[in-house]
Image (cartoon, rainbow, N blue to C red):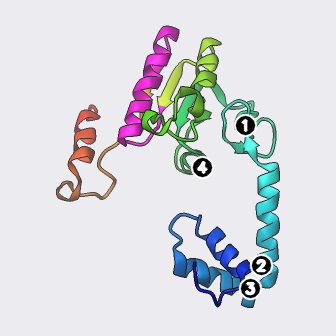
Amino acid sequence: MNNPLYPKALKNLVDSLRILPGVGQKTALRMALYLLERNPSGAQKLSAAIGSAMADIHKCTQCRNLTDKEICLVCSDPTRDESLLCVVENPADVFALSQSVEYKGLYFVLMGNLSPLDGVGPEDVGLDLLESRLAKGIIKELILATNPTVEGEATAFYIDEIAKPYNVRVTRIAHGVPMGGELEYLDSNTLSHAFRARQQF
């Protein structure tokens, strides 16, 4: 943002808003002007909420999901089945699954995927912590729910290799044809996954 007419503080606000996904120059400027002109109390509330979240939210020491406690609500729930562990890429996946699926086990959040070219190794996504949990012998089934991307598949394969010495059943969620979807409109990778994951009718 190089317009010399903009005050420096406005420029900084617009540049800060642009770090959000999907927010470009014009959208960031529109947001900034709205907050400054029409909703200054909302701007103060937003600023306080961001500050509070940054100060209070951190990773759960057991599953790495976001929480404001040492151990998150899922991990501290005594009704959860400790023998089931679902591995996901990020906190949004936990929230999505918890709203859509009748799953009573625990989660493990990678906070990303393995990506050697980007310098992201096993410890960066918590696989050392995951292996230490497997070594305790409590987990009987490991459900891999990483995304069907190249990185997600590579990460799932690596986790499968980690789990082998511990005699843990490793399953992979099916990726395929969505409800209401038509085959002619699906890409080849989706169709391949759906075909390989076919089940008894």
Closer to us: mark 4 or mark 1?
1
Q: Residue at x 77, y 78 (%)?
A: 42
Residue 41, position as x, y percentages in the image: 82, 81
Marked residue nearer the N-terminal end (4 or 3): 3
The residue range painted magenta reads 144-169
**Mark 1 sits on what residue?**
60
Residue 69, position as x, y percentages in the image: 81, 41
Residue 164, position as x, y percentages in the image: 46, 13
Look at the picture and state if 138 lies above or below 39: above
Closer to us: mark 4 or mark 3?
3
Q: Is residue 75 visible?
A: yes
Q: Nearer the viewer, residue 58 or 67?
A: 58
**Mark 3 sits on what residue?**
36
Q: Quadrant of the N terminus?
A: bottom right
Marked residue nearer the N-terminal end (3 or 2): 3
* Measured Cα–Cα span from mark 4 to mark 2: 26 Å
Do tag 2 and tag 1 residues touch (Cβ < 8 Å)? no
Closer to us: mark 3 or mark 2?
3
**Mark 2 sits on what residue?**
42
